[in-house]
Amino acid sequence: MANPSLQIRLTQKLAMAPQLQQAIRLLQLNRIELRDYIQEVVDANPLLDHDENSAQPKEKGEEVSFEAGMAEARKTEGEQEYAGDDFGADQWSTQGDTWTETAGWSDDFSERQIADTSSTSLREHLLTQIRLAHFSEMDAEIAKAIVYALDDDGFLHGDIPDIRESLLPEVRVGEDEILAVLHRVQRLEPVGVASRTPGECIQVQLKAQPTGTAGVDLALRLARDHLKLVAANDYDGMLKETGATSDNLKKALELIRGLDPHPGSRFDNRQDEYLIPDVYVRQNGDEWETTLSPESNPGLRLNKYYISLLRKSGGKDADYLRGRLQEARWLLSSLELRNRTLLSVSQCIVDTQKDFLVDGEIAMKPLILKEVADRVGVHESTVSRATTRKYMLTPRGIFELKYFFSSHVRTTDGGKVSATATKARIQILIDNEPAKRPLSDQEISQLLRETGIRVARRTVAKYRESLGIGSSSERRRAYRRTMTF
């Protein structure tokens, strides 16, 4: 029988006030999700109304602002004091290093949909599973960071270090721990989600097949080592490379072709066929200025009838109205904070990439989240949330804010040039190459070096493939085919 004893145990527990949780949630919503979320909150809160005149042109000085809404909300503080509402822009910047999300939304948010879609979005579907699964608080934070980095087809774009950078400082984990959580997320429904390549997606789904499934071992070999042959339907090549019998190869291919190469595509992730910007950029003399979409200010106001009723009421009615007033004030404050952050981050991006606005991709500068975070005075994860699925309309077109972040390659004089600008230079070289003798990756590497850009042949191949451009031999064959017609 064990003797009773006192023990000291050190644990990490992540907690967040509801208003901070709401602010972070609003920041990561795009324009459409924000509109639908606000409508849902307004429908549920009698103290909030849409200003019917907010969509009409207003004379200067008549705008319905968040500040006006907040001022009206604070009028009631003379009659009632409410705790826990000291929440403003300063808190975002000074406490940004300590903010985090709980492993699951609070009870107030657990059943609330982020967006009004006809079916569940992939993100919400995965977040629900994470809340229900037996993830530790720390692993849940990592899992959510992975989910927020997925594209509409369910693929994870970015490396493990990128996921680590997006986490708050409190989540101190190594890359091995993130990789372990990634493998768990990949086994959520739909299986194969959060894969980094089509090959990995297929392998994850194959490994989830029931034990003894015919052809699974050969299918795994094909997915791991010979996916190009599978994609090209090169049957003879697959027989030669694997040494398999024709019957076994057919079983393996049937298994592969029954899988879903885009596990996220079945979900309603795209809510609009058209991209509508969250941020607008225009030139004013020598300066570039950013403004938010008019929909960023939803024209909310407090319902004067219920405010008056609150001043006169007592008992349970007053308690209910006070609670709804607190929620309304949190929403107004969170919206104001979201817009200030989005505008500050957008302006910082434009200030850095103004040469791109004039000269295009070839003038794109290296930029990482940390640089913007340091300049704006927030944490990297805040910048990541502010730039994900938000779009900026520029004179050169509409771009996701994430597009303006680019890694760098070294120059011969010790400087840096962005990967985007390097890709643009590769595109120019290939566009102007002799059709009968396309440039090899090694030749492109040498030509770039002559301009001062140090890029290895393997990096050239990687950038070329990302541009959707074939190898020199493939381009040569394409040229010969055009000459035969």
Image (cartoon, rainbow, N blue to C red):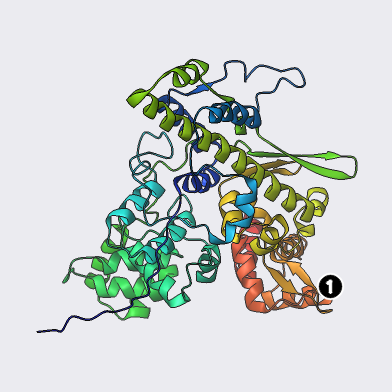
Say what amino acid the circle numbered 1 marks. Thr
Position of residue 299 measured from the top left corner of the image (x, y, whole percent) = 59, 25
Q: Which residue is mark 1?
A: 451
Which residue is located at x 46 percent, y 59 percent?
Answer: 145
Q: Is residue 190 above or below residue 50?
A: below
Q: Is residue 399 visible?
A: no
Q: Is residue 432 above or below residue 34?
A: below
Position of residue 215 measured from the top left corner of the image (x, y, whole percent) = 23, 70
Camera-side residue: 134 or 88? 88
Place residue 476 in its image quadrant. bottom right
Label 1 neighbour load within 10 Å: few <14, some 14-19, many 20+: few
Which residue is located at x 37 percent, y 79 percent?
Answer: 241
Q: Secondary structure at mark 1?
A: loop
Position of residue 433 measured from the top left corner of the image (x, y, whole percent) = 76, 65
Q: Is residue 442 above or below residue 167?
A: below
Q: Is residue 102 visible?
A: yes
Give the left or right position of residue 462, taking residue 449 as reference.
left
